[in-house]
Amino acid sequence: MFALAGVVIIAVAALAIGASPQSIADSFGNGFWDLTAFTLQMAMVVLTGYVVATSPPAAKLINRLALMPSTARTAVSFVALMSMSVSFLNWGLSLIFGGLLARAIARRKDLTVDYRALGAAAFMGLGAVWALGLSSSAAQLQAAAASLPPALLKITGILDFGTTIFTWQSLLTLAILLALTTVIAHFSAPPGRLRAPGRVLLRHRRPWCRPAAASGSWKCRT
């Protein structure tokens, strides 16, 4: 809805400055298909991240990591830290890895954690540090001559990772963001409670319903 509203607003603004309906339609059509390659690249990033995060070795690792936090707030900050750490390698992997880790922790029987806080923490990799990692779009583009417009290439030349994300300034910024985001996630998370000892549940119980004899209504278990 917002995208459609944006298209209408831009079209009206273009008409207001004298552009013809034909030129507006041509610009929209050409610009739309120019994004096809970029769209495919982003889709592949997320798809390959999903494949890696759901592989058997990664699933075992996630289930082991889910047993490590001992309190609700520690669980939230732990998810945030792991999401950001994985995002340094690949932001698409971080999206899926963080979500699966949050789900595994939420399935623990011995710990009650606010699932909303876990979900928010799982997105911290994409929200905080992904642009400082190996999958940074800006760093990737600047390191490949074919990705740069000729005019910009003449000015900047090729900048490898050693002059962008691996500089001490970039790594220091990364460390500060990791620390601050983890601390904020910890102290902003709602406190939970401990329950009887248990392990990570690998499957959800299927809900069932049965009629209640006394009232005639249905009684369901989720």
Image: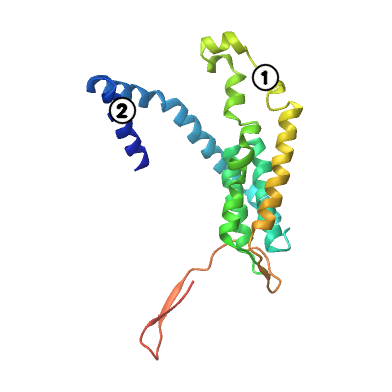
Residue 187 rendering spot, x and y as whole percentages: 69, 57
Specify whether 102 is left or right of 211: right
The outermost residue toward the top is: 154
* Viewer-side residue, 167 vs 112: 167
Total marks placed: 2
The local secondary structure at tag 1 comes to loop
Residue at mark 2 to residue at mark 1: CA–CA distance = 40 Å
- Amino acid type at image mark 1: Asp
- Foreground tag (2 vs 1): 2
Tell me: residue 206, above or below residue 35. Answer: below
Question: Going 70% across and 54% down the picture, which residue do you hit?
Answer: 65
The outermost residue toward the front is: 16
Specify whether 19 is left or right of 64: left
The residue at which mark 2 appears reads as: 13
* Viewer-side residue, 182 vs 61: 182
Count neighbours of disc 1 (C-alpha within 10 A) and say few if under 14, some if 14 to 19, many if 20 or more. Answer: some
Question: Going 66% across and 65% down the picture, which residue do you hit?
Answer: 191
The residue at which mark 1 appears reads as: 160
Is any part of residue 66 visible from this angle?
no
* Viewer-side residue, 119 vs 46: 119
Question: Going 65% across and 63% down the picture, which residue do you hit?
Answer: 200
Quadrant placement of the N terminus: top left
Is any part of residue 171 visible from this angle?
yes
Mark number for residue 45? Answer: none
The local secondary structure at tag 2 comes to helix
Q: Which of marks 2 and 1 is nearer the N terminus?
A: 2
Specify whether 172 is left or right of 130: right
